[in-house]
Amino acid sequence: MTNDECRMTNGRPGAARAGKHLSSRFRHSALLLLLCPLGLLADSLRPTLPAEERTNGKHTLEAVEKLKPLTIECAARIESLLGRSICTATIVGEDGYVLLKASEVPELHKVRIEFSDGRKADLREVHRETRLDLVLAQAVGITGLRAVSFGGAHSLTFGQWLCSVADAGKETRIGIVSAKFRRIPGEGAAMGIRMDEKAPKAGHGVRIVGIASESPAEVAGLQKDDVLITIAGEKVSLSSRVHDIVNKRQPGEIIDISYLRKDKEEACRVRLASRSKVLQNWEGEDFANGGVSLRSDNFPDVLQHSIPLHPIDMGGPVATLEGKVVGINIARVDRVTTFALPVEAFWAEAQQWIKADRHPPKAVPAQ
Amino acid sequence: MRTSFHLLLLVVLLSGRTNAAEQRQSLDKSPKTDIAELLKIQKDVQKLLPKVRPALVAIQTGGGTASGVIISADGLLLTAAHVPNGPGKEMRIVLEDGTITTAKSLGLDEKTDAALAQLKDRGKPWPFVNLSREVAKALPGEWCFALGHPGGYDKSRGPVLRVGKIIKQTANSLHTDCVLMGGDSGGPLFNFNGEVIGIHSQIWEGRDQNVHVSMAPFLRSWEAMQKSQVIKTWGIGAGGYLGVATVMNDSLDLEVADVIEGSPALKAGIRAGDVVLSVNGEAMTDQQQFSATVRARAAGDTLKLKLRTQGKERDVSVKLAQKPQEEGQ
């Protein structure tokens, strides 16, 4: 990647500029302190719009306050057993049925659901649909929920306002339909390593020669010069084999890895991410604020919107200003892009999953 | 040194106080938004989109991808200076419908990140949009919208739209909460007349930290731009610096309240108590207009001021200097 591109993609030179600006702002605020006793505002020459009046500030969000019963009350927060927010869920049945982003919750027994009324429950997995990256679950022992009211997404227009549940189910934010509906092809999974194509001296294992910034491999603690020994239980000695094992899996899947670091054997678990994203953001130039979703591609149809969300907001509902839910947030992709699965892509199917679960086929008595 | 720096800032602040009070008032008119207002904004943007969208282009250079906007039927193109990164550079241009052509960069200004390019003649007019000539009047809180090709041209996705608000304006830039990223560089920011008010330039980490080159540095060289001349430098720094603090006096005239030590104004003989009647023939009626007029001109430009001192009118020429302390971009 050339320097040019870095600048245009706001990479390292961009970051350096950001640092410069921020430090000059800091000096400015020191001056502000100095000047305050004189009753002057440092920014009065060039007024700055207060945070509450910005597009997603308190005053602007007043417009969608009345929609909260149709949005926030129809969503729930998913937390780890230690209480950390993991993602968001959309309520689709008053008897506890919820939809979640499947790749964020590979192990449903390790999470809990918290509803907006404060009730908490365990989740029972009903149906997992990798193609849509959705999982249908039921909150155990919960009834009397408010389910979302779905409306069609394909009648939305370019630039139409939408609102969405944010802050792990606690708040709403607004944005617009910001691009065309389309299919997002998938390029498989990756962990973000470059490997030595030659086998190491000992004749087994594969040496890592580079790690992508903010990649699954970096998050798991892998480093340059580590030598991979086993991947998902299989001994490896060819980089092409490592590539095959990883690439046929789905983003969000966890694989166990053992490796040699300075002749000492170590182990770690890596949660794979979408390959396209890992490669694109190799140098960590994303400026994504709050990170991106592990799985950000391979969807049959997406609604792209500009609502400022985080990966933990995925799984939550997206609604029109009339309160009709038109989709479920499915991937935070980068600084400007969030994908939602439009209602048309999943709801007919999901209703079948619910129906089948509510009315399981009766066992035929033996004659 | 340090003390004098503080002092300068103080005087500058004095001159800005009333302006800010006026502007705050306009911000306070409707602190709370309702659905009707959002729907009005949506309607206005959707009405303008078919007119402005065809003028957006994707730019592909050896170094990466960016955006630009056509501003005349004969194919003048605005973009950010870091996109061509030099005059006379060939760039590959993609229109929204997939049409591919080329453009050559003309003048650019690295300091403000403003650049101009010329599309290859295609024998028929290019779709274009107009520039706002009054960008200095744009206030924080005004709605605006941005188009661009973040991440590069993608036919199945199309251009990406963002709707947001102006957060702040400096001499050469606008800051908005229209969230930008790589590939957007050079793309247009529009007001609700469908005019270009900014060109996407850079971002900081925060979501509200999106910086656009305002039309001010472009307009400073407007004549040269119309002639498609190669412009090597478009003035330095953050607009011209005069070095006076003004107040509106009891008879509602624009009066000089203070003159900064060592400033161009002091050297030209401007003193506290002088009333500013006009600048380059344009009558001055308020402080905002006056500071915008001064800021819209580059360091090195000469201003002709008509002043009134103790009932007597006189003309003064002042060569603007560079601002001693630069704010933002």
Image (cartoon, rainbow, N blue to C red):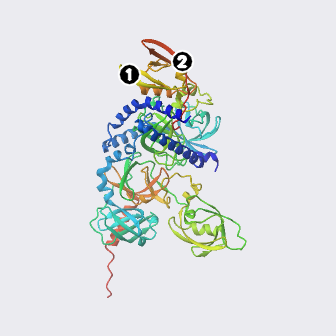
Which residue in the structure is indicated by mark 2?
B317
Q: Would you call the spot at circle 2 few (<14 residues within 10 Å), some (14-19), or many (20 or more)? A: some
Residue A270 occupies quadrant: bottom right
Q: Quadrant of the N terminus of chain B?
A: top right
Which residue in the structure is indicated by mark 1?
B249
Chain for numbered disc 1: B
Q: What type is the residue that disc 1 sits on?
A: Asn
Pick whichever of labels 1 and 2 is earlier in the sequence: 1
Please tell me which residue lies in front, B261 or B281.
B261
Please tell me which residue lies in front, A157 or A308.
A308
Residue B76 occupies quadrant: top right
Q: Position of residue A65 (x, y in %)?
A: 31, 50
Q: Answer yes or no: are tags 1 and 2 on the same subunit.
A: yes
Q: Position of residue A76 (x, y in %)?
A: 35, 62
Q: Is residue B124 left or right of residue A149?
A: right
Label 1 or label 2, whichever lies nearer to me, is 1
- Tags 1 and 2 touching, CB below 8 Å: no
Q: Position of residue A95 (x, y in %)?
A: 29, 68
Please tell me which residue lies in front, B103 or B230.
B230
Instruction: Return the residue found at the far top.
Output: B312
